[in-house]
Amino acid sequence: MEFEEILIRAKQGEQMAVQQIIETYRPMLIHNSLINGRYDEDLYQELIGEVLKCIFYFN
């Protein structure tokens, strides 16, 4: 399935599609959640929130 199809399904509220997008970007989100080499759970959660906003605002 193409990414755009998954994104459309996620925007429609399909939980499995949202989870699939998060899983796809998980390595990047974890990498960007490091501060001075230490994992920051709060930052990770903020990034997840940004991913969800991106899904919501997708046209």
Image (cartoon, rainbow, N blue to C red):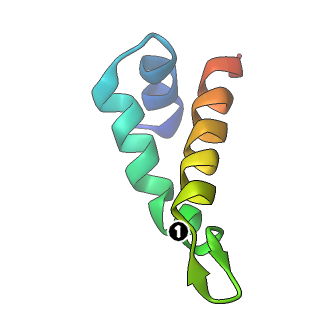
- Up-down relation of residue 55 to residue 50 (above or below): above
Judge left or right: residue 30 versus residue 18. Answer: right
Residue that sits furthest to the top in the current view:
12
| Amino acid on which the number 1 mark rests in the picture | Ile
Q: Name the residue carrying label 1.
A: 30
- Residue 55 % position (x, y): 60, 27
Q: How many marks?
A: 1
> Local crowd at mark 1 within 10 Å, few (<14), some, or many (≥20)?
some
The residue depicted at 46 percent of the width and 26 percent of the height is 5
- Residue 54 % position (x, y): 67, 31
- Up-down relation of residue 52 to residue 8 (above or below): below
- Check the picture and name the quadrant holding the N terminus: top left
- Judging depth in this view, the residue of 20 and 6 nearest the camera is 20
The residue depicted at 38 percent of the width and 52 percent of the height is 23
The residue depicted at 66 percent of the width and 28 percent of the height is 53
Toward which corner of the image does residue 52 lie, by quadrant? top right
- Check the picture and name the quadrant holding the C terminus: top right
- Up-down relation of residue 39 to residue 15 (above or below): below
The residue depicted at 63 percent of the width and 89 percent of the height is 37
- Residue 12 % position (x, y): 46, 10
